[in-house]
Image (cartoon, helix red, strand yellow):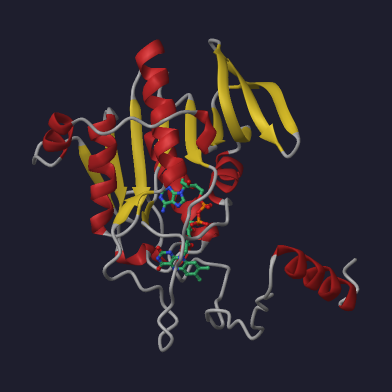
Amino acid sequence: MDIIVLIKQVPNTTEVKLDPKTGNLIREGIESIINPDDQHALETAIGLKETLGGKVTAISMGPPQAVDAISEALGMGVDKGILLSDRAFAGADTWATSFTLGKAIEKIGTYDLILCGRQAIDGDTAQIGPQVAEYLGIPQVSYVYEIEKTRKKSVVVKRRLENGFERLECTLPALMTVIGEINRPRYPDVGGLIAACEEKAPITQWNAADIGVQTSEVGLEGSLTHVIKTFSPKFKREGDILKGNTREAVSGLIGKLKENRLI
Ligand SMILES: Cc1cc2nc3c(=O)[nH]c(=O)nc-3n(C[C@H](O)[C@H](O)[C@H](O)COP(=O)(O)OP(=O)(O)OC[C@H]3O[C@@H](n4cnc5c(N)ncnc54)[C@H](O)[C@@H]3O)c2cc1C
């Protein structure tokens, strides 16, 4: 089975801070990692390859340093990495990001399965997977919890719902977004990591021309979203600390809830 995994390099924090003057994300001093859900997507892909054969390609769109995410993926057992990097890609919203990733996948041509994480911990939209599938015109399954069976032209998967699971069969090629509960990602192999940093490592870099896009179609120019202002929310209300022993604190809490007509 030939599998493509979309991986995003993200800051290792869920507390994204903004520069109050520029409104940009503060990235300095924050370590970068492969987005946690994408580590699960990589593990799923490598596991399938180990059982069924085939190859796994990891693609990441990002600045040059996103190559580190690809090297780590190679260390885990991916066969090939593609870094989509070009100044023209900067400032992309989810529309332009999905378009760019979709174009790169079209250039690859053949694949059985595309795996993504459900959601990135920085952008947090969970839009990329579904948008890439729409762009490519292939079926998609989100929130995949387990790949139960693989057949020649389909897979049977279990996806998580709010209050249970759904089991469905999906024809291939398809795109699936996976959730963290699907598996436990392996650590990259040290030898593999060293090999991934060597010059002959199987990492290709593609720019806008390589994937056949105009600069006006990608990055900030190709984005439909226009950010007017970014700011960190200010918390105006201060919390109340209820004093006294447990009984007094609980009755104080009930009093406050009643006062505010919450109970
Ligand atoms: C106007 C505007 C400008 C922006 N400018 C920038 C910018 O300059 N730099 C910047 O980093 N972000 C920028 N962003 C944020 C950027 O659009 C999103 O981070 C990006 O589109 C991915 O969305 P997400 O983080 O919500 O991913 P989600 O949709 O939550 O991610 C789901 C899955 O999609 C895959 N995926 C997501 N992103 C990538 C990727 N880049 N490569 C490979 N796979 C991926 C992963 O498998 C991931 O788990 C900008 C956003 C807007 C609206």
Q: Examine the rendered structure and indicate whether residue 33 appears above or below residue 203.
A: below
In the drawing, does residue 51 fall left or right of residue 204?
right
71, 131: nearer the viewer: 71
Let me know if residue 3 appears in the view.
Answer: no
Residue drawn at the location 30% of the way across and 56% of the way down = 32
Residue drawn at the location 90% of the way across and 66% of the way down = 263
237, 20: nearer the viewer: 237
Name the quadrant of the N terminus: top left
Query: In x, y percent, where is residue 90?
Result: 37, 66
In the drawing, does residue 232 fall left or right of residue 84?
right
Q: Examine the rendered structure and indicate whether residue 125 appears above or below residue 185.
A: below
Query: In x, y percent, where is residue 20?
Result: 43, 86
Q: Examine the rendered structure and indicate whether residue 95 appears above or below residue 5.
A: below
Query: In x, y percent, where is residue 243?
Result: 67, 76
Let me know if residue 184 appears in the view.
Answer: yes
Residue drawn at the location 12% of the way across and 34% of the way down = 195
In the drawing, does residue 54 fall left or right of residue 240?
left
Residue 185: quarter of image: top left
